[in-house]
Amino acid sequence: MPLQAIEPRRLYRQVADQLGQLIDRGEYAIGDRLPSERELADRLGISRPTVREALIALEVQGRVRIRVGSGIYVTAPPHAGAPDDENGEGPFELLRAREFLESAIAAEAARSARADHVARLDDVLKRMKTSRRPSEEVIDLDREFHTAMAEILGNAVLVRVVRELFDERMNPYFQRLSSYFENRQSWDAAWNEHGEIRDAVAAHDPEKAKAAMERHLRQSQLRFSRSFAETSAAREVAEH
């Protein structure tokens, strides 16, 4: 058999496997509460977003249950057919890649945008404003906005890459993370951020367009970085 390249396993997968092994050895029994995100991050010497990705991976596999405002609890062993994508990118890794790529695209779009390009962005933003948030419809419109930005450059490869990176949010890990952290307020904030990107492009200001896109995707990372306790409080505010 020919030799194949060896890829380093992603850090969040290593953390998920280590926690899974502790559960398998009985150090945490079914029903036990795991240490908090902060405690795990401190013990392992890694960032809390990486711990969060690992916990989400374990929840998707059926190993733990995240109870917002209460903690992370061990559940039954993983069921047959549970997702276990060894090489899947974590949500934060994807957002950082998008920040790097799409900020450069926004700057170039500001240099070459025509009136019809801006009109297309306006149409997407108008439909996004009247859509229920969160919903599949608004996610589709979010995708359309970022794709429309790439299309301004007239480069089919960049359009395809932007679409593919965005579509990675449909993987089970990203979807589970979104279910905890996305709400009407987060999407309202995202709509405003999209508007700032549009305004910079319409003004043909590459630096402002680049900064606005960077800010938008960095804020997306920060929204997903809130603790589960903060998420519980935010949901209570949103529901009243």
Image: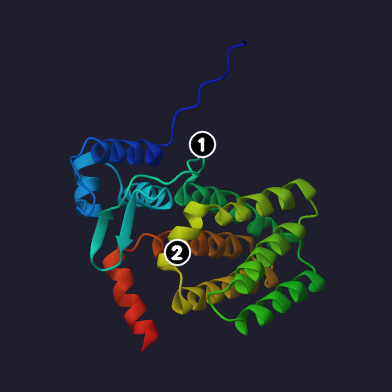
Query: Which residue appears at 73% of the width and 78% of the height?
Result: 123
Specify the amino acid type for callout 1. Asn
Q: Quadrant of residue 2?
A: top right
Q: Residue 104: horizontal and vertical position, in percent?
A: 62, 52
Query: Which residue appears at 68% of the width and 48% of the height?
Result: 161
Q: Where's the C terminus, which quadrant?
A: bottom left
Judge from the rendering whether residue 133 lies leftward or rightward of residue 230; answer left or right.
Answer: right
The answer to whether residue 218 is seen in the rendering is no
Q: Which marked residue is nearer to the observer: mark 1 or mark 2?
A: 1
Kind of element beneath mark 1: loop
Disc 1 or 2, which lies upstream in sequence?
1
Residue bearing the label numbered 2: 219
Q: CA distance from mark 1 to mark 2?
A: 26 Å
- Check if mark 1's residue and mark 2's residue have beta carbons within 8 Å: no
Specify the amino acid type for callout 2. Gln
Residue bearing the label numbered 1: 87
The answer to whether residue 6 is seen in the rendering is yes
Q: Residue 18: horizontal and vertical position, in percent?
A: 29, 36
| Furthest residue toward bottom | 240
Q: Quadrant of residue 33?
A: bottom left
Q: Residue 91: horizontal and vertical position, in percent?
A: 48, 51
| Furthest residue toward top | 1
Query: Which residue appears at 65% of the width and 77% of the height?
Result: 125
Image vertical order of residue 239 relative to residue 152, above or below: below
**Label 2 crowding class (10 Å Cα cut-off): few <14, some 14-19, many 20+?**
some
What numbered label is drawn on residue 118?
none
Image vertical order of residue 129 relative to residue 41, above or below: below
Kind of element beneath mark 2: helix
Q: Residue 3: horizontal and vertical position, in percent?
A: 58, 12
Q: Nearer the viewer, residue 204 or 186?
A: 186
